Image (cartoon, helix red, strand yellow):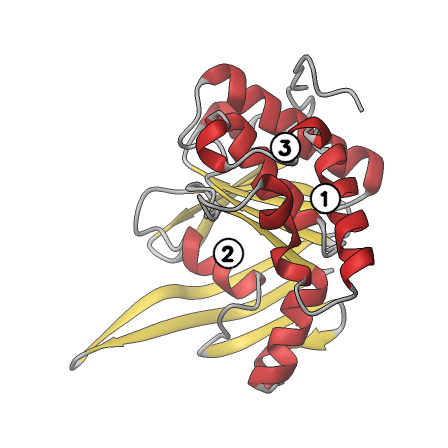
Amino acid sequence: MIELENVTKIYQMGKLEVAALNGVTLSIGEGEMVAIMGRSGSGKSTMMNLIGCLDVPTSGRYILEGEDVGQLSDDRLAAVRNRKVGFVFQTYNLLARSTALANVELPLLYGNGKDRRRRSLEALDRVGLADRAGHRPPELSGGEQQRVGIARALVKQPSILLADEPTGNLDSRSSEEIMAILQALNREEGITVIIVTHEPEIAEHTRRVIYMRDGKVIDEKTVAQPRQAVARGLER
């Protein structure tokens, strides 16, 4: 599904060139659940932006489901991103004055109104929040807000889910709930899940861990027995 071939990403900072990625070659198969780990400045966030079609390589090739992303126009890149990729953010990025349902509906604003509501309610149900559809973010716990964020990513029916530090602001119980949802989406629905994290215990929930430093992939390991998250109260 995802192929990076000798990818570099260079940012111009005045007269200085900064190589955020430096010759990365990587494959991620359809239906994998992968963690990308590294310290701040390792290039993992730049990697996520490229995989999510938010940016394009300076050199090298990124092939997504047979398409060379670097050769796409901005409009075509946006279309691929909107159709294939769902994003989950550490800070949730929810509208505080809108209900959970309205937040989930946001990616579908230009679609059919009736279908938009149905799909959004279904997405909330998939994360165990159908009964909280009318609540606003300040009325929800951090874990519930992140579950709304996951529902918003799912409503577009993406084949890839990119989660950037999805448990970074959560306590251990809420983190377990989020990982249980991501594992279920991967296991039961075949969604390719890529998690950017600095927490080894979160990476242990995935099947493969990719380690980055100084813009390079320095190592990777297969997790023989991924840790299975267990969370109560999420049954649909």
Task: Identify the residue at image location x=72%, y=31%.
Answer: 130
Task: Identify the residue at image location x=31%, y=46%.
Answer: 40
Q: How much space separates mark 2 and mark 1, taking CA atoms?
A: 15 Å
User: Camera-side residue: 121 or 165?
Assistant: 121
Pick whichever of labels 3 and 2 is earlier in the sequence: 2
How many C-alpha atoms fall within 10 Å of the one at disc 1: few (<14), some, or many (≥20)?
some
In the rendered structure, find residue 206 and report the number of the disc placed on it.
3
Q: Position of residue 47 (x, y in %)?
A: 48, 58
* Quadrant of the frame with the C terminus: top right
User: Camera-side residue: 13 or 119?
Assistant: 119
Q: Secondary structure at mark 2?
A: helix
Q: Position of residue 128 (x, y in %)?
A: 71, 27
Pick whichever of labels 2 and 1 is earlier in the sequence: 1
Q: Amino acid at mark 3?
A: Thr
Q: Position of residue 232 (x, y in %)?
A: 68, 12
Circle 2 or circle 1, nearest the eye = 2
Pick whichever of labels 1 and 3 is earlier in the sequence: 1
User: Camera-side residue: 124 or 55?
Assistant: 124
How many C-alpha atoms fall within 10 Å of the one at disc 2: few (<14), some, or many (≥20)?
many
> In this rendering, would 224 be left or right of 199?
right
Of all residues shown, which one is farthest toward the left? 15
In the rendered structure, find residue 48 and report the number of the disc placed on it.
2
Evaluate if marks 2 and 1 touch, with contact meaning CB atoms under 8 Å apart: no
Q: How much space separates mark 1 and mark 3, taking CA atoms?
A: 9 Å
Task: Identify the residue at image location x=76%, y=34%.
Answer: 126
Q: Amino acid at mark 1?
A: Glu
In the rendered structure, find residue 32 and report the number of the disc placed on it.
1
* Quadrant of the frame with the N terminus: bottom right
